[in-house]
Amino acid sequence: MTEQQFIKNIIPLNERLSRYAWYYLKNKDDVYDVIQEVYIKLWKMKDTLEKYQSSLALALRITRNQCLDVVRKRSKSHELLIGESIVEPEVVYDNSQEVYENIKKAVNKLSGIQKEIMILKDIEGYDYDEISGILDMDINAIRVNVSRARKKVREMLKDLKCCR
């Protein structure tokens, strides 16, 4: 891959990679550092990038691994692992801030992989094949986890409405 191809095909992924890293890190400086590392790794791989079916899936997988490294380092130093997830308000169609906050809380209560898969599928809009490439998981396992995550979120939202 030439420098021009890299600039044309890889650099525009910045926003998606940054948003994905944000779900893990919740810190602008950490996200910036991770994305910088991702681009360095991708640049070093520029001669082999064309053999990958999806450069986006590869970039997201590298981003995920870099974020997990940062989270592991944080946990060793007893910092908070994950803060509140930021979901763009446009995702909530009725524009109700209360509903938005409840959904955000419910998604944040999911277990690690279910939360990650639900964010990729329902918030970021990736299809099952892309998620499979990003997480290196079987598509059926992803479908099961999406289904279970959605069911848990629905139950949590029902519980919130019942408790008022």
Image: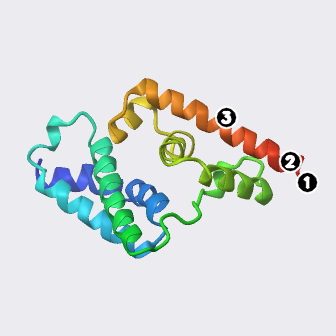
Measured Cα–Cα span from mark 3 to mark 2 = 15 Å
Left or right: residue 98 versus residue 164 is left
> Relative to residue 138, is residue 24 depicted above or below?
below
Count of numbered badges drawn on the protein: 3
Q: Amino acid at mark 1?
A: Arg
For marks 3 and 2, the one nearer the N-term is 3
Left or right: residue 50 versus residue 35 is left
Residue drawn 66% across the image and 57% down it: 89
Residue drawn 67% across the image and 56% down it: 105
On residue 57, the disc is none
Instruction: Identify the element where label 1 is drawn.
Output: loop
Quadrant in the rendering for residue 63: bottom left
x and y percent of residue 147 in the render?
Answer: 59, 30
How busy is the neighbourhood of tag 2: few (under 14 within 10 Å), some, or many (20 plus)?
few
> Relative to residue 126, is residue 96 depicted above or below?
below
How busy is the neighbourhood of tag 3: few (under 14 within 10 Å), some, or many (20 plus)?
few
For marks 3 and 1, the one nearer the N-term is 3
Viewer-proximal residue among 95 and 101:
101
x and y percent of residue 100 in the render?
Answer: 72, 55
- Residue linked to disc 1: 164
- Residue linked to disc 3: 151
On residue 161, the disc is 2
> Relative to residue 27, is residue 11 depicted above or below?
above
Q: Amino acid at mark 3?
A: Lys
Do labels 2 and 1 touch, CB within 8 Å? yes
Q: Amino acid at mark 2?
A: Lys
Quadrant in the rendering for residue 37: bottom left
How busy is the neighbourhood of tag 1: few (under 14 within 10 Å), some, or many (20 plus)?
few
x and y percent of residue 23 in the render?
Answer: 49, 58
Q: Residue most toward the top?
A: 140
Quadrant in the rendering for residue 24: bottom left
